[in-house]
Image (tube, coloured by chain):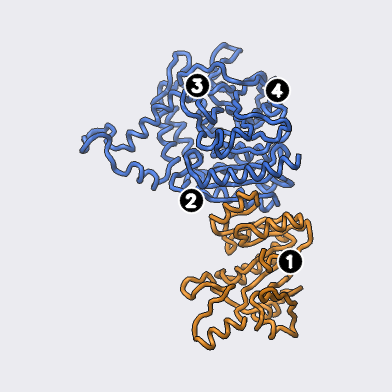
Amino acid sequence: MKNEFKIITNLLPSQSRVLDVGCGDGTLIEALIKEKNIDARGIELEKVKVKECIAKGLSVIEGDAETELSQFPNKAFDFVILSQTLQAFYQPENVLSQLLRIGDRVIISIPNFGYWQIRASLLFFGKMPTTKSLPHTWYDTPNLHMCSIKDFYEFCEKKEIKIDKVVGINGEKISPINRINLEMKNLFSEVGIFLVS
Amino acid sequence: MNYKIKNIKNIIVNNPLKLDCGQTINNFPIAYETYGKLNKKKNNAILIFHALTGDQFVAGENPITNKQGWWTTAVGPGKAIDTDKYFIICANVLGGCMGSFGPKDINVENNQPYGLKFPVITIKDMVRAQEFILKHLKIDKLLSVLGGSMGGMQLLQFCALYPDKTFSAIPIASTASHNAQQIALNELARQAIMSDPVWNKGNYYQDKKIPKNGLAVARMAAHITYMSDKGLQEKFGRKLQEKKDYEFTFDADFQIESYLRYQGKVFVERFDANSYLYISRAMDYFDLPGQFKNGLNEAFQNHNTNFLIISFSSDWLYPTKNSKEIVIALNASGANVAFAEIKTDKGHDSFLVEEPEFLKTIKGFLDSNFEIFKNEK
């Protein structure tokens, strides 16, 4: 299991109610059920992946999180997870407010556009960057609203979203992020994980 | 219909059943069939609810019609619903014509077939009548319930009535509430039957007659709604029926005409016209949200059942929208729900034909639920 999922698993208390938005093939949901007896379910857009989840017996519904989160009642979940997909929505701000409505707390991970390799690619080569966590080229990327860890941090502050915890991932290295080391971590983290409420 | 119904497995329900219409019935037969073996722990039982014109003969050969069971694509040894592994039960619905209590049965009070004297039944009545089968077989909790179309309606009603009687549930191409278009199409079919002079206000059994023209038209109209525009076009297009040019008559020039006529013709041989009226009426009365003060959400409150909702992209009779309403209600009430829309051109009938994606999905879901259920029990 990838580092990001391990960190998320550790953040979640056992037996909590969790919704994984954009759950893919259900890897994280399976781990949460198995390792922490969490009541985890998911929503996923891609038909093939939904069927993989269902074949594993997971409670996953086919649907578009952009428009279909409204079906869940307020605070239906203890935690809502959005793993590296916020940037792919047409209206990420709306989606985020839905996540905060249906979940008590929200875990959001973002591929960090402030990562040094990305900055270097644009600065030295004058080309749109492609990296391990952002493998697409400019013409086929599903990502519409890229942001950096710093962008999202400041966005939360501006919108008065409470930041409970931020973690940066750089390869195998995992480090906590706060206001003080934000500039540094924004440069050296490939992925940022935010716990907000 | 011409078939003699004998040697059909049934139970006689010796328990007064108060119907939604207010009448009470007692000492009535419910016919059923089973496939596979019930294991010792009784945790491998699956109840299948049939659709409007289905019957209890899901798999193998139907002993009455000598045709293949209606869901042989899905049910059988090694199939998605594997009879080597699971014990399958299916009952003929109340009001049906394959051995369960229906309008063609003899009313002991006047020694005449009931005809329109048969009480108007609902989906809930059907479900409550079938529950006696589970009591008879001494099954406390099913592994799963499955049903397509009207079968899905019975399934939802079953889950709402008996929240603890099944571990999982798979409603397919169905709805929680019959809408105006669905009622309209049923009314069209009923009017076709009732406008046949042979129907004679439901009294046609004595003379061994069948209102076959009306019933055939009803079937033809319904059959169109089971297929998609694209599916029809690909299969028939404008192809002519064994001829090179138009005949400039009203005989079946086009293959699609001939096909529909054939569907109508074979249907009247196996189905009772009055049963069609009664069962289609039950569908129209089905409105699960209407049974609860707080609508559909309340129907599934505090449910532990694992639901898998399936719809088909080209189904315009019970479209994905109807299935999504069920998904939304289940989500709102916190039930366990999975949902998949299968992409296909085969329309509403997709659940009855060989549709690999669909069959794979239900197999995976059933097998993984069985693994959990058998360890739980």
User: For the residues marked 1 and 4, what is the alpha-carbon distance in whole angstroms?
Assistant: 52 Å
Q: Quadrant of the C terminus of chain A?
A: bottom right
Up/down of A193 relative to B158, above or below = below
Residue at point 48%, 51% (across, down): B343
Residue at point 54%, 16% (across, down): B6
Mark 3 falls within which chain? B
Pointer 4 residue: B16
Chain in orange, by letter, is A
Chain in blue, by letter, is B
Q: Nearer the viewer, mark 1 or mark 4?
A: 1
Dot 1: element: strand
| Of residues B229 and B120, the one drawn nearer to the viewer in this rendering | B229
Q: Is residue B37 left or right of residue B351?
A: right
Q: Is residue B161 left or right of residue B75?
A: right
Q: Amino acid at mark 3?
A: Ile
User: For the residues marked 4 and 2, what is the alpha-carbon distance in whole angstroms?
Assistant: 45 Å
Q: Nearer the viewer, mark 3 or mark 4?
A: 3
Contact between marks 3 and 1 (CB within 8 A): the answer is no
Pointer 3 residue: B64
Q: Position of residue B327 (x, y in %)?
A: 62, 50
- Residue most extreme to the bottom: A124
Residue B152 seen by the camera: yes
Pointer 2 residue: B343
Pointer 1 residue: A105
